């Protein structure tokens, strides 16, 4: 006996959207549309699944896959239905969404009833456990109904009636007039199987009344089928035939595959019961033509039986002649079957050997590819090792040779200043001081360059520390300017740049601070390290006299800062007015 699944339309309520037309269309899908237009719904919701995955919206993806599973169920594709239902369960578990998890477990359990009854029972028990623990009363109304159906399939009728009546009580409480007919029909079906015909008919009539009052076309078709089941059970074959035809007409107009198959099958039984074997044969042919994977060997055997029943009354002599021919051809059929079996075995053996050879070739090819990749990786490592050694050698030479020479120049200049201290020649002393300062700055620049060369990568925390060292040095060079360092990017500390990008960022910061000290006449300089979207943002702000940024001035280092920013795919911005100048550098965190 057929059981029709009822899934609550609230799957589609409260659906989160992001302004996309596809997501908005899912929100307004009705349960009836999914039942009667499943093919178009599948195409639409597949797009919504992709959109939600692109937006990393797991909640929307989970709901969309639940709807997709339902659409595949009414389309007759039970394999895809199970796949998407199980995927939605996993997503709801990950989200911790217990309400929708309970709904999805109940749905997949119900749909498994004709495939794996034991698994169906397990899923519904899990659904009940979650829903009862969390007091999901509205969802329990549907889950109790479906669990009652499973109990009836285990022939536990008392338990089945108990759970379905609990479902009815909750649906009446919530005025669920869409769900009530399903529960009434399920209860009527149980009483029909127990041969309590009056009760069965009363529940079928209650369900039909609600569906006619709400103009539920699919539901009306469903209830005519239940009435057909009732009349067939009490052997009122003509009334059963009428009811099944009424159901079939609606199901055919809406292309509801499961109802059409059910009505074809039941018309076969009804016509057979009425002794109309020709009609039974006709609907058996219809059933076979329309049938899909549900059509099994048992159904085919019944078609053959109806054909024999009909022909035995009309053509008994012809059947006897055919039997004689069958006996004569038995030997040739056996021979042919043996030959087919032998050839099939040989073909399978050839396919198996071919597969073994193919897998062997694939294994050799994969092994060769991995060996080549390993060689390339080793060569790259060796190249990087040599490059690092070369950089260390250059930095050592710079430190040992040029560094020592500059130190000697500073020492010599200081000695000359002491020797001429008694001479009142301010111009000479100023020039010597300038040479000493220039040499000291050159050593500092050289140390910064060596610092960068000795690193394969420079973390943002390294840049901050180096910048703080420079700021501390700048503080010692002037007592007229205060410095404030704002660190608002601690979450980025362990992100790294290569040494080229790192030294460019540091040089831009250094150039901006030096320009401010030299030209801005500022009393306060603020430096900000902060995260802006997916970028490191550095801001140098002062309260100096400002300058015209549109007037060319090669001496202020603007050109160098812009060039350095462009070379590392960064953005350089500057704004200036009297009392405020802001230099801002934005560097992408994913650029290396």
Image (spheres, rainbow, N blue to C red):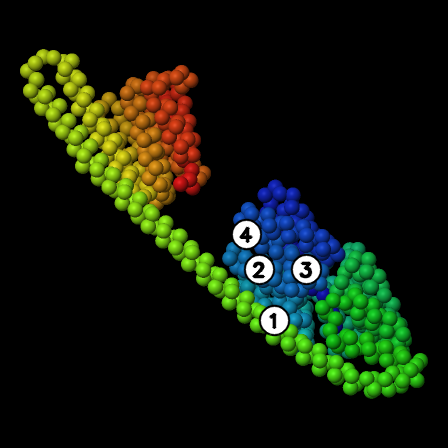
Left/right of residue 512 with respect to residue 303 in the rendered view: left
Q: Earlier in the sequence, mark 2 or mark 1?
A: 2
Q: In the image, residue 253 lies at what x, y percent?
A: 82, 57
Image quadrant containing the C terminus: top left
Q: Which residue is mark 1?
A: 351
Q: Quadrant of residue 167?
A: bottom right
> Tag 3's secondary structure?
helix
- Characterize the local packing of mark 3: few (<14), some (14-19) or many (20 or more) Cα atoms within 10 angstroms: many
Q: Nearer the viewer, mark 2 or mark 1?
A: 1
Please indicate, yes or no, whether residue 155 appears anywhere in the rendered image.
no
Q: Earlier in the sequence, mark 4 or mark 2?
A: 4
State the residue at coordinates (71%, 82%).
Answer: 338
State the residue at coordinates (27%, 35%).
Answer: 449
Q: Which residue is mark 4?
A: 58
477 in relation to 547, above or below: below
Do residues under tags 4 and 2 come within 8 Å of each other at their CB atoms?
no
> Tag 2's secondary structure?
helix
Q: Which residue is mark 3?
A: 72
Please indicate, yes or no, whether residue 379 appears anywhere in the rendered image.
yes
- Mark linked to residue 87: 2
The alpha-carbon separation of the residues under discs 4 and 2 comes to 11 Å
Q: Quadrant of residue 511?
A: top left
Image quadrant containing the N terminus: bottom right
């Amino acid at each position: 006996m057929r059981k029709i699944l009822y899934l609550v339309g609230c799957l589609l309520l409260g659906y989160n959207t992001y302004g996309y037309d596809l997501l908005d269309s899912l929100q307004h899908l009705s349960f009836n549309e999914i039942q009667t237009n499943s093919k178009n719904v599948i195409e639409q919701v597949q797009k919504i699944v992709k959109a939600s995955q692109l937006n990393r919206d797991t909640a929307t993806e989970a709901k969309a896959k639940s709807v997709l599973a339902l659409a595949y169920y009414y389309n007759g594709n039970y394999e895809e239905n199970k796949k998407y239902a199980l995927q939605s369960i996993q997503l709801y578990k990950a989200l911790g969404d217990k309400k929708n998890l309970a709904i999805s477990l109940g749905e997949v359990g119900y749909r498994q009833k004709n495939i794996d009854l034991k698994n169906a029972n397990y899923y519904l028990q899990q659904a009940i456990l979650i829903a009862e623990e969390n007091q999901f009363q509205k969802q329990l109304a549907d889950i109790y109904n479906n669990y009652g159906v499973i109990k009836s399939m285990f022939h536990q009728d008392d338990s089945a009636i108990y759970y379905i009546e609990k479902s009815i009580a909750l649906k009446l409480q919530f005025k669920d007039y869409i769900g009530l007919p399903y529960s009434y029909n399920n209860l009527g079906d149980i009483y029909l199987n127990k041969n309590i015909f009056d009760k069965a008919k009363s529940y079928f009539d209650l369900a039909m009344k609600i569906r006619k009052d709400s103009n539920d076309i699919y539901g009306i078709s469903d209830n005519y089928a239940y009435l057909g089941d009732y009349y067939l059970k009490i052997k009122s074959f003509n009334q059963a035939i009428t009811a099944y035809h009424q159901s079939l007409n609606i199901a055919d107009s809406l292309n509801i595959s499961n109802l059409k198959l059910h009505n074809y099958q039941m018309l076969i039984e009804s016509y057979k019961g009425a002794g109309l074997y020709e009609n039974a044969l006709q609907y058996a042919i219809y059933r076979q033509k329309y049938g899909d994977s549900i059509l099994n060997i048992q159904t085919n055997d019944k078609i053959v039986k109806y054909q024999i029943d009909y022909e035995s009354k009309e053509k008994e002599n012809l059947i006897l002649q055919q039997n004689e021919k069958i006996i004569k051809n038995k030997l040739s059929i056996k021979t042919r079957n043996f030959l087919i079996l032998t050839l099939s075995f040989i073909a399978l053996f050839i396919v198996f050997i071919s597969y073994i050879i193919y897998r062997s070739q694939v294994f050799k090819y994969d092994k060769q590819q991995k060996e080549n990749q390993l060689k390339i990786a080793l060569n790259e490592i060796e190249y990087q090792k040599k490059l690092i050694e070369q950089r260390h050698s250059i930095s050592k030479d710079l430190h040992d040779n040029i560094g020592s020479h500059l130190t000697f120049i500073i020492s010599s200049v200081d000695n000359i200043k002491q020797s001429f201290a008694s001479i009142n020649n301010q111009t000479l002393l100023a020039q010597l001081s300038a040479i000493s300062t220039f040499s000291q700055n050159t050593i500092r620049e050289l140390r910064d360059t060596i610092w960068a060369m000795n690193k394969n990568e420079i973390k943002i925390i390294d840049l901050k520390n180096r910048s703080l060292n420079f700021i501390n040095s700048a503080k010692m060079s002037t007592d007229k300017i205060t410095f404030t360092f704002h660190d608002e990017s601690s979450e980025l500390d362990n992100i790294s740049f290569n040494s080229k990008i790192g030294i460019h960022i540091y040089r831009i910061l250094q150039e901006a601070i030096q320009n401010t000290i030299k030209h801005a006449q500022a009393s306060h300089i603020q430096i900000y390290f902060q995260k802006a979207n997916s970028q490191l943002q550095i801001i140098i702000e002062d309260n100096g006299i400002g300058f015209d940024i549109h007037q060319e001035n090669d001496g202020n280092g603007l050109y160098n800062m812009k060039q350095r920013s462009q070379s590392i795919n960064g953005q350089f911005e500057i704004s200036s007015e009297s009392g405020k100048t802001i230099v801002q550098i934005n560097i992408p965190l994913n650029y290396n």
